[in-house]
Amino acid sequence: MQPRCRAQACTTWQRHWRRSQSSARVPVLTDADCTISDETFEQLVAFLETSRAATGTDLPVEQAADYLIQIGINDMVGNLLRSLDPAALVQDVLRLAREHPTEVYDYIAETMRRGAEEIARLEQEASRPLGFVTPR
C-alpha cells in the first residue's frame, strides 16, 4: 500500500502505529497522521530496492519506515550512551531502578539468565572433542 500525497510539500499517512497482535516486533499502521517530505518518501521507496537486493525479501513501505526510524533512534541513543562515563551510566541505571524497580530488575534478571544460558552453550561447544571420530 502506498500513501498518497495530500499536499505538494508532504506525504501524509493517515495511520497510527500500534503493535500487531501476531508479532510484537512488527508494527501496524492504523488511524493518525505521520507526515514526511516527498523527498524522504521517494528515498524510502527507492531504498526498498536496496533492501530487497540485500535480503531477498519484499518489505512493505510502512515496515521499512518503522525499521529505518528504529535504526536511527538506536544509533543516536547508542552514540550518546557510548560517549558517557561508565560510572555515570551505572548511577543512572540505579536511579532508574529506584523509579521503576519492577521493570529494571526484571530486565536485569532476564539479561543475566540469557547470559548464563549463552555461557553454558559456549562451554558445551568448547568441551566437544576436536578432530575426527573413528568408527568402532
Image (cartoon, rainbow, N blue to C red):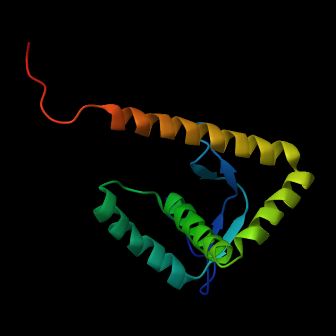
Q: Is residue 98 left or right of residue 123?
A: right
Give the image quarter of residue 34: bottom right
Residue under the image location 15 percent in, 35 percent down: 131
Above or below — where is 9 with respect to 23?
A: below
Closer-to-camera residue (12/66): 66
Q: Quadrant of residue 124?
A: top left
**In front: 46, or 23?**
23
- State the residue lying farthest toward the left: 135
Q: Quadrant of the C terminus?
A: top left
Residue 94 placement (x, y as % from top left): 84, 57
Residue at screen point 37% across, 55% down: 58
Q: Tell me if residue 109 can be seen.
A: yes
Residue closest to the far right: 99
| Residue 117 place in picture, x, y as percent | 53, 35
Q: Tally the numbered discs.
A: 0
- Asked whether residue 3 appears in the rendered view, the answer is no
Q: Residue furthest top?
A: 136
Vertical side of 18 occupied by 135: above or below? above
108 horizontally vs 23: left or right: right
Residue 133 falls left or right of residue 123? left
Q: Position of residue 82 (x, y in %)?
A: 63, 74
Q: Nearer the viewer, residue 30 or 44?
A: 44
Identify the residue shown where x is 77% and y is 63%.
Answer: 90
Q: 119 or 61: which is nearer to us?
A: 119
Q: Is residue 69 left or right of residue 104?
A: left
131 is higher (above) or lower (below) than 70: above
Q: Can you tell which quarter of the image residue 83 is in?
A: bottom right
The residue positioned 56% from the left and 48% from the top of the image is 26
Residue 120 percent coordinates (x, y): 48, 34
